[in-house]
Image (cartoon, coloured by chain):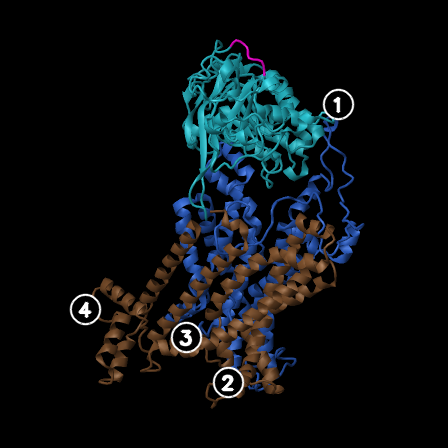
Chain colours: A brown, B cyan, C blue
């Protein structure tokens, strides 16, 4: 219990640091976009919105920095992330709500596929080392070193342009309204195939290698030898004894990478014009849409923190040794 | 390096850079020590390790009040099973971590140093050999480097030829041919050779006390005798006091002058090795002695005496810690911890079974308490409480 | 059950009292062979390949601008020309020679890789080893610091920082990458240091009277060299991929040629749709080859660190030659391999573990993949 409490303390501290950093970002940036925005929309921004903007970006010079900081926290805790400049007058939280699910769904799904596939293949490769299986390794390292976006663009060129099997961009056919109809879902899957394929291909190698190494290490442990000596069927030993232990670090890594799902999808969404949160962030940076930028940054950080916490909790449950140690 | 250990006063006061008179390169005065003088003693040594983690409270009572006196030219064996606290005692004496309670005295002066120059001065007198010869040498350093560091720390100012001579002397003292071994890495040596290098490293400090934590447990059986003989030789020639920690009571008899038996962090029996092993007084010692396989007596009912397991060290049982396993235990044993009772010259045992035969042994307990009857298993009690106490209190 | 792995050292003579002199044989004891054993990871075919490829890139980085057939900025009349004798990789939309662009671009890629690698590794060593060794409050503070940096999304942060600067040159990018990329290595090193700290030889060094400084520098750090090396290699990979991505999305300075810049131009001008594969494909391939070389080096280090993996890395022929017959599921243990790391196990990411702490193998690191 003390252990988990300490970890929780860590995370609270990290969250605080992230929010504070977020607070300072627009204040150290050049230019005064809020003022120009207010000028542009003279009279069309109500007082509350103006006040929010002032507070969020500390451009109200009359207040002390500390007061601005406190106000910022107040706004954050109320879920008020401000109003987006580029999508004025849509609130930031709305923009995020619209784009986050796409990212999480696509990249999350692709990551899960990559992890499961990679772990299974890695288990098999690790178990049967010394055979032809080992020659796959150099090929896999090649794929894992390829820049993701490059692979994506190549796939687009091959499978969307030259041989138009899949659509080249967007999350669903433009013009369709989102619903749970079969047609819509089919369109979503179709559009999501290429991005997902690229993600899986470029990341699966890492999982395979990790699992393989662990399987090799665990395979030489005595308890595996005993299990085989007992006469258990090979499959049972491989999964129940070797893989069960080898998978522990994979689980941690997986939980952590969930956090990176949100933050690392930026380039993928650019390449495939996928309306996810990464693309929004990039557009926001370009358009100097500070509220949106801050809001997305915060969401990403919180997501990574949550993933870390999940990783810790899962690991404590999976590995009985940790329950006794400090 | 024959008798300098016994007459260090010849080197006089601090000999920093000037002290290069051959082997007497010590830099601090050492008191003149005759054989059998107490060099290092521990009084009421206690160590509790606080528990951290998911179970947040409590502590492991590794050692609970042990008195020990190491004398020059004597070997004291500390015998016990895993978890008895014997390794902890060694590390406490080596000042690798602080004790929870109790004092350690070197030549009568209390020792509190744990770092810096004060600790180095202490380390020059008290050295330690570890159990695992494969782990106690840094795998990336050669024997030469390891020994050079030890020499340089404790014999300041040596370099070049003199350093080389000192290194060779050290290796020869542990019966390793310098030419063959000085440039080897630990993984190129066998277990016995590594342990000899570890002993050489300890000797570089020219210590008065050697704490040997199960030095032969991890060695092949055929080499164990060699290491023990080496240690015996060091005791005889250099007058080093040796604390020999082991779980094997037979080697204690072979090697040690006195034996302390520990169980669950407390001493249960002390005495000279011959008596302790031949006529063990405490039921636990009897169990240890009986458990050694005797090729001449393969079938014996006595052998089935041991039941049970070592106790939980986080919450040790009240009363005598051996009572759950003891065939003679009574209610008294389970509620009240027996003190060390003197049953002979330099012989003590912590068992209520001897309380009635020792003067004042029953003072602390109610008159109606039932004492365990050891019967034929009891060791003979000689004229008690007339010998000099074990430890200066 | 007869195919138990053969122990190559089975013929070793038992070390008895009378032959104290004889060392355990297996590897020979003459100095030359011993030296080679120290660098056994270099003899691994994988790492040799990796090192050779890396060396080629380093050489190209140094001499690239001098041997390039054209100035990468020179426009010509051959717009979007496919590969030919005068333009080995064709030209771009302004008639500039793609091959020269890539050649010159190698330099900035290698510089960024190297500077980031050195910088981040230095930071990781400093913070990770200190945290592991000091323990207590300093450890908590440094770990919290590393955690904060790990949690912050690196790429968005870098983009924000880089977009603030008028001209984000290579050095700036490298420093920013180093400042955001050290945290993972620090965590791994801290775990390793914690595990080493409880080892007997460290305690023995203390018992001998060594000062803490010397213990850290001369006893602990030499045992960490393999981990540090692999962390360095991983960081270089991360830096190269990141820099390429940053250049691709247009964040870095356009006047600085790098592989990513080439891709930026290619994408901005619809290279693929126009069928100009020679413009787009080679840059990505270069990154992949460099990344692969670095990963191979890491394999070599991995196998050096973890003797069990070494067997896994041997080809079937090598194993037959050594007389080892691996059974499916068994990993035969070859005795007398250097026992630099007695308990190799994988990286544990999230929490703090006490002794028995696993050794990191590089392929477990989930770097933030830049997608």
Chain letter, disc 1 residue: B
Q: Secondary structure at mark 4?
A: loop
Q: Earlier in the sequence, mark 3 or mark 4?
A: 4
Q: Secondary structure at mark 3?
A: helix
Which tag is nearer the camera, tag 1 or tag 2? Answer: 1
Q: Secondary structure at mark 2?
A: loop
Chain letter, disc 4 residue: A
Q: Earlier in the sequence, mark 2 or mark 4?
A: 4
**Residue B213 coordinates in the image, percent (x, y):** 57, 30
**Residue C216 coordinates in the image, percent (x, y):** 49, 42
In the rendered structure, does residue B380 fall within the stretch colored magenta?
Answer: yes
Chain letter, disc 3 residue: A
Assess whether mark 1 and mark 3 are in contact (beta carbons under 8 angstroms): no
Q: Which residue is mark 4?
A: A62
Q: Is residue B392 left or right of residue C307?
A: left
The magenta stretch is B379-383
Residue at mark 1 shares a chain with residue at mark 2: no
Q: Nearer the viewer, residue C303 or B55?
A: B55
Q: Secondary structure at mark 1?
A: loop
Q: Which residue is mark 2?
A: A172
Q: Nearer the viewer, residue A197 or C18?
A: A197
Q: Which residue is mark 3?
A: A281
Assess whether mark 3 and mark 2 are in contact (beta carbons under 8 angstroms): no
Residue at mark 4 shares a chain with residue at mark 1: no
Q: State the separation of the CA atoms marked 3 and 4.
A: 30 Å
**Residue C366 coordinates in the image, percent (x, y):** 53, 62
Q: Which residue is mark 1?
A: B296
């Amino acid at each position: 219990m003390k252990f988990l409490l300490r970890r929780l303390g860590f995370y609270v501290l990290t969250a605080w640091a992230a929010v504070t950093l977020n607070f300072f970002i627009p204040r150290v940036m050049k230019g005064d976009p809020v003022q120009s925005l207010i000028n542009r929309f003279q009279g069309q921004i109500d007082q509350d919105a103006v006040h929010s903007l002032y507070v969020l970006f500390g451009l109200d010079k009359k207040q002390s920095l500390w007061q601005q900081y406190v106000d910022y926290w107040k706004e954050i805790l109320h879920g008020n992330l401000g109003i987006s400049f580029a999508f004025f007058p849509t609130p930031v939280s709305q923009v995020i709500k619209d784009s986050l699910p796409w990212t999480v769904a696509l990249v999350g799904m692709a990551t899960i596929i990559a992890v499961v596939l990679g772990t299974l293949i890695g288990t098999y490769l690790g178990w049967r080392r010394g055979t032809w299986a080992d020659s796959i390794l150099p090929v896999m390292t090649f794929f894992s070193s390829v820049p993701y976006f490059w692979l994506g663009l190549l796939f687009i060129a091959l499978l969307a342009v030259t041989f138009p099997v899949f659509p080249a961009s967007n999350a669903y056919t433009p013009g369709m309204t989102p619903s749970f109809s079969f047609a819509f879902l089919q369109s979503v899957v179709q559009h999501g195939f290429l991005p997902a394929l690229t993600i899986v291909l470029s990341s699966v190698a890492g999982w395979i290698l990790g699992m393989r190494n662990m399987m090799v290490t665990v395979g030489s442990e005595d308890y595996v030898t005993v299990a085989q000596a007992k006469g258990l069927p090979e499959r049972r030993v491989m999964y129940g004894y070797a893989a069960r232990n080898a998978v522990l670090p994979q689980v941690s890594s997986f939980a952590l990478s969930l956090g990176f799902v949100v933050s690392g999808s930026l380039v993928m969404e650019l390449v495939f014009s996928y309306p996810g949160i990464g693309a929004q962030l990039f557009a926001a940076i370009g358009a100097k849409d500070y509220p949106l930028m801050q809001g997305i940054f915060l969401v990403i950080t919180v997501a990574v923190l949550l993933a870390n916490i999940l990783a810790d909790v899962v690991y404590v449950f999976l590995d009985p040794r940790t329950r006794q140690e400090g | 390096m024959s008798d300098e250990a016994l007459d260090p006063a010849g080197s006089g006061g601090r000999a920093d850079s000037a002290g290069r008179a051959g082997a007497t390169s010590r830099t601090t005065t050492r008191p003149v020590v005759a054989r059998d003088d107490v060099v290092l003693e521990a009084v009421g040594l206690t160590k509790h390790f606080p528990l951290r983690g998911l179970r947040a409270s409590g502590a492991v009572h590794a050692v609970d009040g042990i008195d020990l006196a190491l004398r020059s030219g004597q070997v004291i064996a500390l015998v016990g099973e895993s978890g008895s606290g014997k390794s902890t005692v060694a590390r406490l004496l080596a000042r690798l971590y602080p004790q929870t309670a109790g004092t350690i005295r070197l030549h009568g002066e209390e020792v509190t140093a744990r770092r810096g120059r004060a600790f180095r001065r202490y380390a020059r007198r008290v050295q330690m050999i570890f159990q695992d010869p494969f782990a106690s040498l840094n795998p990336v350093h050669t024997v030469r480097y390891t020994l050079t560091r030890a020499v340089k720390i404790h014999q300041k100012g040596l370099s070049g030829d003199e350093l080389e001579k000192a290194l060779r002397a050290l290796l020869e003292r542990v019966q390793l041919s310098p030419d063959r071994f000085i440039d080897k890495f630990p993984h190129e040596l066998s277990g016995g050779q590594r342990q000899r290098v570890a002993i050489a490293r300890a000797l570089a400090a020219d210590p008065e006390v050697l704490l040997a934590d199960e030095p032969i447990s991890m060695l092949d059986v055929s080499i164990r005798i060699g290491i023990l003989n080496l240690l015996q030789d060091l005791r005889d020639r250099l007058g080093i006091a040796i604390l020999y920690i082991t779980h094997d009571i037979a080697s204690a008899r072979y090697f040690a002058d006195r034996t302390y038996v520990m169980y669950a962090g407390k001493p249960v029996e002390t005495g000279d090795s011959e008596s302790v092993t031949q006529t063990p007084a405490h039921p636990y010692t009897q169990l240890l002695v009986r458990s050694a396989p005797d090729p001449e007596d393969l079938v014996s009912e006595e052998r089935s005496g041991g039941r049970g397991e070592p106790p939980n060290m986080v919450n040790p049982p009240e009363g005598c810690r051996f009572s759950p396993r003891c065939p003679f235990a009574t209610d008294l044993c389970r509620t009240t911890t027996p003190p060390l009772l003197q049953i002979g010259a330099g012989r003590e045992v912590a068992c209520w079974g001897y309380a009635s035969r020792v003067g004042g042994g029953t003072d602390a307990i109610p008159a109606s308490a039932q004492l365990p009857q050891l019967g034929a298993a009891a060791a003979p009690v000689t004229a008690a409480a007339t010998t000099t106490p074990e430890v200066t209190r | 059950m007869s195919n138990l792995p053969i122990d190559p050292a089975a013929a070793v003579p038992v070390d008895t009292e009378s032959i104290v002199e004889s060392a355990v044989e297996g590897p020979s004891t003459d100095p030359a062979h011993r030296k080679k054993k120290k660098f056994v990871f270099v003899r691994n075919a994988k790492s040799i390949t990796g090192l050779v490829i890396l060396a080629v890139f380093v050489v190209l980085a140094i001499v690239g601008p001098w041997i390039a057939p054209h100035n990468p900025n020179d426009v010509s009349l051959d717009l979007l020309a496919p590969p030919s004798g005068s333009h080995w990789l064709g030209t771009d939309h302004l008639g500039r020679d793609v091959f020269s662009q890539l050649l010159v671009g190698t330099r900035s890629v290698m510089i960024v890789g190297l500077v980031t690698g050195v910088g981040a590794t230095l930071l990781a060593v400093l913070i990770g080893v200190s945290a592991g060794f000091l323990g207590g409050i300093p450890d908590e503070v440094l770990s919290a610091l590393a955690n904060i940096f790990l949690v912050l999304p690196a790429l968005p942060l870098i983009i924000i920082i880089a977009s603030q600067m008028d001209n984000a040159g290579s050095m700036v990018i490298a420093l920013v990458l180093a400042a955001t990329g050290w945290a993972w290595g620090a965590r791994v090193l801290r775990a390793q240091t914690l595990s080493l700290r409880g080892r007997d030889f460290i305690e023995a060094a203390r018992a001998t009277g060594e000062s803490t400084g010397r213990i850290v520098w001369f006893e602990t750090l030499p045992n960490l060299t393999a981990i540090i090396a692999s962390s360095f290699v991983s960081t270089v990979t991360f830096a190269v991929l990141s820099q390429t991505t940053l250049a691709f999305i247009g964040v870095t300075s356009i006047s600085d040629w790098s592989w990513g810049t080439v891709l930026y131009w290619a994408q901005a001008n619809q290279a693929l749709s126009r069928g100009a594969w020679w413009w787009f494909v080679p840059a990505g391939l270069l990154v992949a080859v460099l990344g692969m070389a670095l990963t191979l080096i890491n394999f070599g280090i991995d196998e050096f660190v973890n003797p069990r993996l070494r067997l896994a890395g041997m080809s079937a022929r090598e194993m037959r030659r050594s007389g080892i017959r691996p059974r499916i599921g068994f990993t035969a243990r070859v005795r007398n391999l250097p026992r630099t790391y007695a308990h190799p196990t994988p990286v544990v990411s999230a929490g703090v573990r006490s002794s028995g702490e696993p050794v990191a193998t590089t392929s477990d690191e989930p770097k933030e993949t830049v997608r």
